[in-house]
Image (cartoon, grey):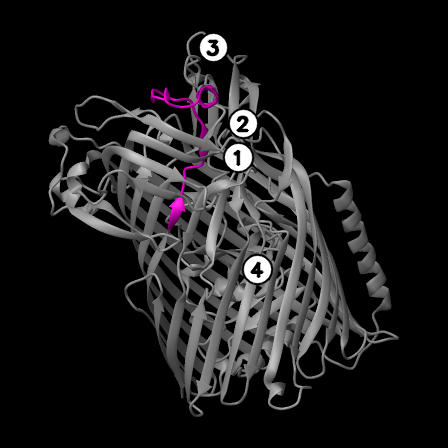
Amino acid sequence: MNFSWTKTAVSVAVLSAITTTSLTVSAQEESVVNPSEVEAIEVKGFRSSLIKARDLKRSANGAQDSIVAEDIADFPDLNLADALNRIPGVAITREGGEGRQISLRGLGPDFTQVQLNGMEALGNSSSAMDSRGGTSRSRAFDFNIFAAELFSRVDVRKAFSADMDEGGIGGTVNLETAKPFDYDGFKGAVSGQVGHNSLADDLSPRVAALVSNTWDDFGALMSVAYSTRDINEQGYNTYRWRQKNASGSDISGLPQRTQELINNEELHFSRGSRNSIFLNDQERLGITTAFQYRPSQSLNLGLDVLYGELNNDRDEYHLQSRGSSSTALGCGGPAYAGDLTCSVVNEIRYNDKNEVMYSNFSNTSIHSESREQYADTEFKQVVANAEWQMNDDFAIRALVGHQSSDFETGSAKVYVETFGDLTIDYTNDRFYGTNSYGFDTTDIHQFKYHEIDLQETEINSSFDTASLDFEYVLNDSSYFTGGVIYKKFENETGQVDGKDLNKSEWSNGTFSDDIAEGVAFTNREHQKLAWTSVNVSDVLNTWAIVRNLESDPTKDEVEEETLSAFAQYNIDIEVPIGDLRGDIGVRYYDTEITSTGFLNDNQIDVSNDYSDFLPALNVVWDATDNLVVRGSASQNITRPSLGSMNATGNVVNDPDSPSGLNIQAGNPLLEPYESVNLDASLEYYFDEAGYAAISYFHKSIDNFILVETYDRPYGETGYPLAFLGANQNANTLYTVIQPQNVDDADISGIEVAFQRDLDFLPAPFDGFGVIANYTYSDGETLYRNVGGSGEDEYKSFPGLSDHSGNFTVYYETDTWGGRIASSYRSDYISTVQAGNQDEDERGFHSTTYVDFSAFYQVNDNLKLTLEGSNLTDEHEEQYSDSADRLYNTTENGRSYYVGLLYDF
């Protein structure tokens, strides 16, 4: 077990603080309050939810922000990720116009641990776009799986303490569903909304209901949320940009200098250069049930059950260049018998970066791609918990839970091809190309069959958790907690591909009118463009192609078993000025990993284990009734992504292959990311409502994981000698491409937050209030072989936006109210490429989203609501390479919801 100097220093500081604190604890008249026993407060209205969230923030020992439901089954935003986006330090990624994943304090989604009803959880969905990650094997939680109405409270814990599960360097997000004893006696609510998107055709309904009752010592609750969404996301995108030669195209009509640049592969051509439409019929269902039994004041038993479904039925349509490397250059031909057709380059205009901004081609290959895809997630969780106050000084708590998340997706693509004249123009907008065609793109007789691709993927994850901890009161001002937790995590992924399903029957090329479809595209300037597409299901039926590739695909598996234990000392004492409270402790964890995969189609099993101690200190000084000073120091880890730990690999032992002798594989022997975390904040709480705060955070991260490319004797790779080629031995050099623990990195930043009712203003302006926050984050690490250049380069963390912030203005009375909120996120890198010569990095431009919400309280029970999202019709711009070239620009329109909430 290795400790860096910094870790050792933190450990010594924590142990010293334990000794010092033990000597300074003094008696205090107040008894220790268990947070789980805080009296439930019925929260109604946006202002009341802010007050409750503020109180939770103030009472926490470490840095924390919370969101509380405004009313029964009424969360402040339509989506959990959108609601979290209002919290200082949180930025989100979006999918189809709603939040999907979060980054916390500059660290990407993999670094945030998500807990659901007290146990770690993982839920996977997917993106329709490969450029956004498609289907990935990560530890990132997809918040779009659940409707926000199912949850009563969300806590974002940014500082680590020993009694928290290890695993979230960025922080821990805990989602809580409602419990029957949250309410007094019988309670019920039903809500309904109807929404419409400016780009979609159909309406999007949402309904939710909750009923809860208590009978003396027993309570039961059930809630249901169901919604459908009609999503239309459209735009213009590329497959990156590439330096290309003529590849057989006729460039004789171009100026000599332009011909030289093309022949020397000095000009960057956009690939794909396509207009795109992404349609999605989304269905979401969530059901929660909760039971509580309190036979006495000292015993509390609970059972929580959660079920969630997210089903996506997607259709995509693209009209794209498909010549050499998917540019408009080169030669192409249909899958059926026929001669190759080579394009003629009529005109090229390029800028000072040698990027082709305008190009005109004749007889170039053009494809219409039609795709049908389903992407379904099913989530299940059962958690049983118990609390027993054995006597005045000693209490125990236990939790047993099981959670599973099953994700399946299947895709079928049909390509039809034609040849014709094409102009690609980026001169008006660098991030939104305009294509024009020298033929009727809606004429089905122009197109012939080319290719069919099929793919199916399954990702299955499960958690089993059992924990037992205790609390022992030492005196009126201190208590001791400790416990053990066992977690077993299993993940398996399988994928089957069926590509290039060309058929000899396609020799006639054309297809019938009843299979053809037409799609209409409206670009950014609202200029209409239509083209021929196909009904994918009809095509598959016509050619008797079975969509189900394999009923049980071979799967890669990762299994983790972790045993953890913690000990923590907690204090709340009087000091000469104010009060001092906090906790100090240490956590020990031991993790064993087994990764099962396939090396050249042969099953292999690789095992690994690691363990460590994680000290933590949180101190809060309540200097006055209004002023709070907070500080934290801790160590924590984040485990490697599931894809990185995949044992599957491929040994290429043919020295004459295009890539030479090489091994590409995951790495089950990876160590976790390790971090030393420092936090400090100064917070001022106003007497009535609101607060102002400034916070500083710093994280020093070791064992940063990057994909490395290096040469090594085969015998040192650990792979069986049986995979060596002829005349090779253990000393034969192979190029190995796999994730490795390489460098350390630092990230630091400042958060500023302000929340205030403007009740000091004269009526009627005293109903106004303001919420504002801003986060600055800075961090970078060393990446190897960036863009296939052989050079190492410092770049920002993936997912890190230097600047992010939110600003909300609200107005509320007893009968009506409303708020308008904006959220800003600056540019960020999504991935840094090693070995990809098209680009050195990929990321997103800055965005500003504006949302609106209003209500009218008809009577004590009935409330009317109006909500709008993306009021400015913000576009998502994804760039390729640090030269900032277009990768993908999409818009998803404005959405509006009108509804009612009735509680009884």
Instruction: Tell me which label, 2 or 1, sits earlier in the chain.
Output: 2
Q: Nearer the viewer, residue 160 or 819?
A: 819
Instruction: Tell me which label, 3 or 2, sits earlier in the chain.
Output: 3
Instruction: Tell me which label, 3 or 4, sits earlier in the chain.
Output: 3
Instruction: Tell me which label, 4 or 2, sits earlier in the chain.
Output: 2
Q: Which element carries disc 1, helix, strand or loop?
A: loop
Asked if disc 3 and disc 4 are in contact, CB closer than 8 Å, the reply is no
Relative to residue 236, is residue 55 depicted above or below? below
Q: Is residue 186 left or right of residue 64?
A: left
Q: Which residues are magenta?
A: 235-261
Q: Which residue is mark 3?
A: 728
Amino acid, disc 4: Tyr
User: Which dot, 3 or 2, sits closer to the camera?
Assistant: 2
Question: Which residue appears at 57% of the width and 68% of the height?
Answer: 397
Figure quadrant of the C terminus: bottom left
Q: Position of residue 111 (x, y in %)?
A: 57, 50
Q: Which residue is mark 2?
A: 788
